[in-house]
Amino acid sequence: MDDPDPPLRYTTARAMLAGGYTLAAYCRRCDRWADVDLNRMVREGRGDKCLVGPTLRCRVCGHVGEGQLRPPAPGLCGPRE
Ligand SMILES: [Zn+2]
């Protein structure tokens, strides 16, 4: 059995935070972006929940949203001198 190497290792809120990533979710129905509050997920004990797949729901319409992992923005991680 092949062990499928996931293209993204950051599959949980805790791992995303550790890597400096943020997660945004897009709702097609509302044409709306929302930032996922990873810190809150960890506080609520959901830090190790796998966020891959249709796990995010739009707070406005309840439609399943599409998650987009965003890498740490260069230049925002402190001075590089
Ligand atoms: Zn929506």
Image (spheres, helix red, strand yellow):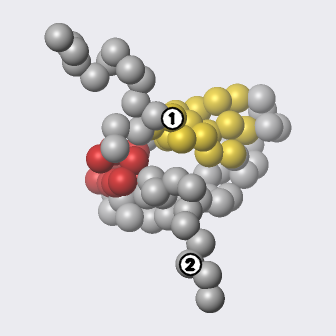
Task: From the image, tell me which residue sits under label 2.
Answer: 3
Residue 9: x and y in percent read 46, 57
What residue appears at the point 45 percent right and 65 percent down from the top-left corner? 49
Task: Determine whether the residue tagged by mark 2 lies in a helix, strand or loop.
Answer: loop
The amino acid pointed to by label 2 is Asp
Left/right placement of residue 43 relative to residue 30 reads: left
Residue 24: x and y in percent read 56, 37
Left/right placement of residue 31 relative to residue 71 reads: right
Total numbered circles: 2
Mark 1, Cα crowd under 10 Å, few <14 / some 14-19 / many 20+, is few
Task: From the image, tell me which residue sits under label 1.
Answer: 70
Task: Give the answer, above or below, for where 50 lies relative to 69.
Answer: below
Residue 60 seen from this side? no
What residue appears at the point 77 percent right and 29 percent down from the top-left corner? 31
Task: Give the answer, above or below, for where 80 lies relative to 20.
Answer: above
Q: How far apart are the two marked residues, 2 and 1, measured between alpha carbons?
A: 25 Å
What residue appears at the point 56 percent right and 78 percent down from the top-left corner? 3
What residue appears at the point 28 percent right and 23 percent down from the top-left corner? 77
Residue 14 seen from this side? yes
Task: Give the answer, above or below, for where 19 lies relative to 79.
Answer: below
Residue 64: x and y in percent read 72, 51
The amino acid pointed to by label 1 is Arg
Q: Toward the viewer: 50 or 73? A: 73
Closer to the eye: label 2 or 1: 2
Task: Give the answer, above or below, for where 1 lies relative to 7.
Answer: below
Q: Quadrant of the N terminus?
A: bottom right
Mark 2, Cα crowd under 10 Å, few <14 / some 14-19 / many 20+, is few
Q: Toward the viewer: 49 or 9? A: 9
